[in-house]
Image: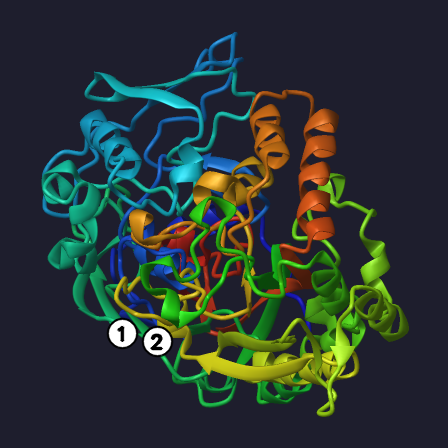
Amino acid sequence: MKRSVLIPLAAAMMFASAAHAERGSDGELKILYWQAPSILNPFLSGGTKDIHASSLIIEPLAHYDTDGNLVPTLAEEIPTVGNGGVSADLRTITWKLKQGVVWSDGSPFTAHDVVFTADYCLHPEGGCNAAERFQDVESVEALDDHTVKITFGVAKPFPYGPFVGSEVPVFQKAQYQDCMGAKAPECTEQNFGTIGTGPFKVREFRPNDVVLYEMNENYRIPGKPHFSSVLLKGGGDAVSAARAVLETGEFDYAWNLQVEPEILSTMESAGKGEVLSAFGTSVERLMVQLTNPDKTLGDKRATYQNGNNPHPFLSDPAVRRALSMAIDRQILVDAGYGPAGRVTCNVLPAPAIYASKANDWCKTQNIEGANKLLDDAGWEHGSDGVRAKDGVRLSILYQTSTNSVRQGTQALIKQMWQEIGVETELRNISASVFFGGDQSSPDTFQKFFADIEMYTNNFNGTDPENYMLRWTCDKMPSPETQWIGQNMPRYCSAQYDELASELSQTAELKDRARIAKQMNDMLIDYGAMIPLIHRGGVAARANSLGGGAYPNVWDATPWNIQDWHRK
């Protein structure tokens, strides 16, 4: 695979503006997300595909560009201490909004929409997927129609959580004001037809299938977007998505190509497109279910219950450590990722200053050591070769999304676990469902009605504070949170929560790195998750497509969709 040369952002935008003067002149853009969007409200879904699909419509105050730099979007500039936007005591940040911005329905965008969005996400009866981005927020107030002041309860050395990045966009108050709290998932019309300030608006949305966008005639930048419409097609698989760009030329861009490297290389040789890759913070990992997912528990199934609902065997630290020790991660990289993957033992692999070395033991498979660990913990082999203790068998239900690379990884790990006496049942679920926002489905990754689940996650920007907050005690999905939350293992540690609080108040970069590493090491040492592969973001782009159409590992890939154009 080759990696394309990235044109500096400012130069790319100047080129695009000079080459294209007429809005919508490039016709239809066709994008493939084989993980089909299921909702256009990112606050109600943890699925990356839903966040990306929404980013064509709704915008934050600022984005991260492809180099991880903050760039203003709905704001005039990035507030700092130097320009007076961040107070000297680091307890407030004041955003000045661009004037003249209107929603796609023609109504004015104001600071009151920003305030409302904070109220929407922080509603005590709701389950907002971006709640950690509002950590320590005491108030969000409109000083006037174009000025928003956010006040924190503590000094915030990195105050760019709220409304920064595609995970935390601004909603139109008029559209969502009757969708607060527990009513949020019931507002289908709003969640499927979100009104935004972005370059496109929804023409038609068929959940788990396709989104049809049309140009927003009220978009604020003259001459943009360059495309008059966008077809975002979902479903299928990563291989067929790659083929549709690289071989048949039916589509212009395909996202998240978790495809064997030799297959991509063969497709690329057809000459119709190129494979792109960029490394950020994405980690393919195993999440370990620490609570009991037995369906006979009813509403208590896979819930924490104040620590009184432990998993029947994954609550044993020896089992969790043995599962990790038995995995040969380099084989997984070689078989499924090639140069687009690296072995990792951390859930926080980048930027480099945050990457811990404390867990490097995981880089070497140790079957002998894993077997001894289980022997010493009293897990004995049965006549069928499966270990058991006190009538409990080490029999794992291991689920992930449907994808050839993931099923290959599952099969390899099943073989490795068999060598230590662990029985494994493999299950794969359509990515549209697994990563979807359907509160009634039992198959979402947030409900996690299994023992082990595998997927990739990452974070926007280069600061890991909000990412590491995902595993505090209050971030567990449950019926009370509408099954929203990122703490899939149901991990809870008072010490971890204290470190999260300390990180949020620490200014020096070296100290922030020390704390973040410590939090990472706690998660890995405990075995709440088992990191496997540091993944590069891989995509395919048609040769005819330009204008910054490139994987953005720090934000949503379509963050700059208004600049994409035909060469």
Badge number at residue 210: 1
The colour scheme used here is: rainbow
Q: Which image quadrant for residue 418?
A: bottom right
Whether residue 342 can be seen here: no
Question: Is 136 rendered above or below residue 549?
Answer: above
Residue 157 x/y as whole percent: 56, 21
Mark 2 in CB contact with mark 1 (< 8 angstroms): yes
Mark 2, residue position: 234
Question: Is 151 rendered above or below residue 491?
Answer: above
Mark 1 is surrounded, within 10 Å at the Cα level, by few (under 14), some (14 to 19) or many (20 or more) other residues, namely many
Give whichever of 17, 404 is nearer the camera.
404
Give the farthest residue toward the top: 88
Q: What's the residue type where badge 2 is placed?
A: Gly
Give whichever of 385, 229 is nearer the camera.
385
Q: Which image quadrant for residue 442?
A: bottom left
Residue visible at 49% across and 62% down in the picture: 292
SS class of the residue under badge 2?
Answer: strand
Question: Is 165 rendered above or below residue 347?
Answer: above
